[in-house]
Image (tube, grey):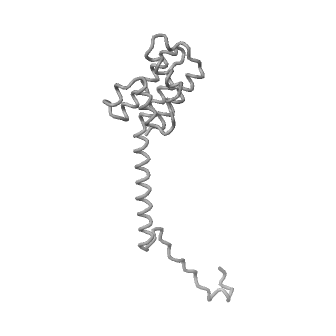
């Protein structure tokens, strides 16, 4: 500055204010932070646990998607096999493993909120599994409907 200006001689340098602390000093905000951190941790743990718990469902759906629909008999048996494996994984093996036919359809229908397999497609499926040459008259629409039923059961069983 110029020393010739008399008006500027009485001015003092400005004082910088104190830095504002990032972390709050009151106990209330600390409690809110701890509560938020705890809630987020519990939510994340439940999310990861649910993801790992439902791994068998994702694997079964991938196995069904990989099945070939070229031969109806092989496809129907493979669907039954995948569904039986899922049920044996989720429910006691001794209860599920020996089920077939009508008791198997009843079991499947009781484990889902929707009617499920108690329709004509379910009965036709079980009949085709246990009768020779009973799987030759399946249309692609029926196979698709059965696959949809099986996938819905895998996704929604309790």
Tell which of 6 and 16 is nearer to you: 16
- Which residue appears farthest toward the left when viewing the image? 94
- Count how many numbered circles sit on residues in the image: 0
Q: Is 130 located above or below residue 22 in the figure?
A: above
Q: Residue 33 appears in which quarter of the rendering?
A: bottom left
Q: Is 39 located above or below residue 2 in the figure?
A: above
Going 43% across and 73% down the picture, which residue do you hit? 25
Going 41% across and 32% down the picture, which residue do you hit? 107
Percent x, y of residue 70: 54, 15
Percent x, y of residue 36: 45, 61
Q: Is 97 located above or below residue 70 in the figure?
A: below
Percent x, y of residue 17: 53, 77
Tell which of 119 and 69 is nearer to you: 119
Q: Quadrant of the C terminus?
A: top left
Going 50% across and 33% down the picture, which residue do you hit? 116
Percent x, y of residue 72: 52, 16
Tell which of 154 and 96 is nearer to you: 96
Please give left or right for residue 125 compared with residue 97 in the image: right
Going 56% across and 26% down the picture, which residue do you hit? 145
- Which residue appears farthest toward the top when viewing the image? 133
Tell which of 107 and 41 is nearer to you: 107
Please give left or right for residue 130 compared with residue 7 in the image: left
Q: Quadrant of the N terminus?
A: bottom right
């Amino acid at each position: 500055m110029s020393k010739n200006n008399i008006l500027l001689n009485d001015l003092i340098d400005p004082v910088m204010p104190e830095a504002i602390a990032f972390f709050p000093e009151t106990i209330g905000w600390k409690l809110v932070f701890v509560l938020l951190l705890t809630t987020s941790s519990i939510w994340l743990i439940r999310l990861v646990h649910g993801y790992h718990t439902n791994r068998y469902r994702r694997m079964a759906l991938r196995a069904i998607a990989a099945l070939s629909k070229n031969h109806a008999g092989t496809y129907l048996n493979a669907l039954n096999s995948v569904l039986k494996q899922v049920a044996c994984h989720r429910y006691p093996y001794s209860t599920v493993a020996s089920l077939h036919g009508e008791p198997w359809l009843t079991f499947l229908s009781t484990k889902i909120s929707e009617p499920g397999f108690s329709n004509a497609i379910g009965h036709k499926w079980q009949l085709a599994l246990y009768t020779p040459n009973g799987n030759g008259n399946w249309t692609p629409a029926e196979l698709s409907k059965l696959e949809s039923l099986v996938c819905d059961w895998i996704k929604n069983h309790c």
